[in-house]
Image (cartoon, rainbow, N blue to C red):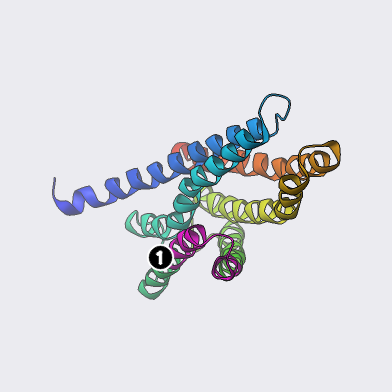
Amino acid sequence: MTFADLAYPSLVYFHLLLFVLWLGGDVGVFLAGQHFRKREIYTLDQRIALLKLLVLIDMGPRTAWALMVPVSLTVVTMGGFWAVPPLMLAAAWAVGGLWLWLVWDAHNHDMTPRAARDRKIESWLRIGLTVFYVWLGAQSLIVGEPLAPVWLASKALLFGLIFAAAIMIDVSFKPVGPQLGRLLKEGSSDETEVPLRATMDRTRIWVWVVYLLLVVTSYLGLVKPF
């Protein structure tokens, strides 16, 4: 096989690897979070160690998510499903690279104004991508273009909904910072633990939504039922 023959299936394989890294890493984050909640089993120090591990594991899914944007559009182009304009494709890779840098820069400078700035930019970036993918999927389902296959248009729409649900995870999780600070300052008690647990429970709803959407999206991409 020539390089040209290998390029498309290799990119599809990389696309699949990103999905595995995303969903598999998220499962690790979920399990670490589950154990963090068990204050009757673990000491506070052990739970904080679990939380640090959770944050580190979460970098895998965040990395995959950022790369999924340019890779997915490139797969669509190379597969002949949509002739994505070269400038748009180049912009997708630029956005993916910027997003990836923001994710890791915020992680490496956590709890600083620089990290706060990075996450604010990332937030606006994700909102823009949410609008783009929801429009792309809805437009294609309604008029049959630019994505003609119904399974692919549905996948684009669901990808946009994944963005929306992930944004809601961050919104729901926002109170955890102050609540965790209070827990560290005052120690473990019902007064510090119950509000934190309630916030995490609300966040878990959106986590399950993301898992469901990821599974359905991957099914559409593999089976192509319609």
Q: Quadrant location of the N terminus?
A: top left
| Residue at 50 percent of width and 50 percent of height | 152
Q: Secondary structure at mark 1?
A: helix
Coordinates of residue 18 in the picture (x, y in percent): 42, 46
Instruction: State the residue in front, 144 or 188.
Output: 188
Residue 45 versus residue 93 in the image, above or below: above
* Corner quadrant of residue 177: bottom right
* Corner quadrant of residue 72: bottom left
| Residue at 49 percent of width and 39 percent of height | 25
Mark yes or no: residue 158 visible: yes
| Circle 1 residue | 97
- Disc 1 marks a residue whose amino acid type is Gly
Instruction: State the residue in front, 176 or 226.
Output: 176
Mark yes or no: residue 226 visible: no
Which stretch did the figure color magenta?
97-120
Coordinates of residue 184 in the picture (x, y in percent): 71, 46
| Residue at 61 percent of width and 68 percent of height | 120
